[in-house]
Image (cartoon, rainbow, N blue to C red):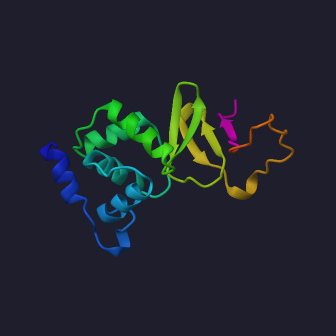
Amino acid sequence: MSDTINQFYHDHGNHGAEHAECGTVGLVDRLRKAGLRPTRQRIALGHLLFSRGDRHVCAEALHAEAQSAKVPVSLATVYNTLHQFNEAGLLRAVAVESSKTYFDTNTSDHHHFFIENENRVVDVPESQITVSDLPQPPEGMEIGRVDVIVRLRPKS
């Protein structure tokens, strides 16, 4: 593994109990519990993702953050890691367009605003939306979750 990733791993190691969730020890445990091998690249990207609280990020933005943090990962590795984290339940994919997916570090059931002119996703406050009267799913199917994305744009 590259010296830069090794240095990042060393610099962003466990910072005490108050940072256990985003520190290396907490992150390694979280990855293992999700069934993922804690590689240095997953740890480095996981730290960038989870150390700032709940947020929405696309692959390109995370790749830019990694480059700024001197973590030498390709955009393909970032895409793969985000999708692996999503499959493992560590992230929640929010598809705003067929070609654009954001990843949410808040995996609880909630809905989103998409601010079109800013290409930004924000959470809808929990009490502001109610989904009811869902259709019966076809035979042998069940509803996995309901995602509501409210698209916003400036008033004309």
Q: Quadrant of the C terminus?
A: top right
Q: How many labels does the image show?
A: 0
Q: Which residue lies furthest to the left in this view?
A: 3
Q: Which residue lies furthest to the right in this view?
A: 133
Q: Position of residue 35 (x, y in %)?
A: 42, 52
Would residue 127 appear left or right of 93 to someone viewing this image?
Answer: right
The residue at the point 66 percent across, 47 percent down is: 111
Asked where in the image residue 135 lies, by quadrant, the reply is top right
Prevalent SS, magenta region: loop
For the question of whether residue 130 can be seen, the reply is yes
Q: Is residue 85 shown above or below 60? A: below
Residue, x 22% and y 55% (percent of image)? 9
Question: Does residue 147 show up magenta in the picture?
Answer: yes
What residue is shown at x 43% (from left), y 58% (from top)? 33
User: Which contiguous range is marked in magenta?
Assistant: 146-156
Q: In which quarter of the image is the N terminus?
A: top left
User: Horizontal and vertical percent for residue 57?
Assistant: 46, 42
Question: Residue 148 colored magenta?
Answer: yes
**Is residue 9 toward the left or the right of residue 82 in the image?**
left
Q: Can residue 51 be seen in this view?
A: no
Residue most extreme to the bottom: 17
Which x, y percent locates residue 37? 33, 50
Image position of 116 with respect to 44: above or below:
above
147 displayed left or right of 82: right
Q: Which residue lies furthest to the front in this view?
A: 140
Q: Residue 55: image x %, image y %?
A: 49, 50
Task: Establish if 49 lies above or below 63.
Answer: below
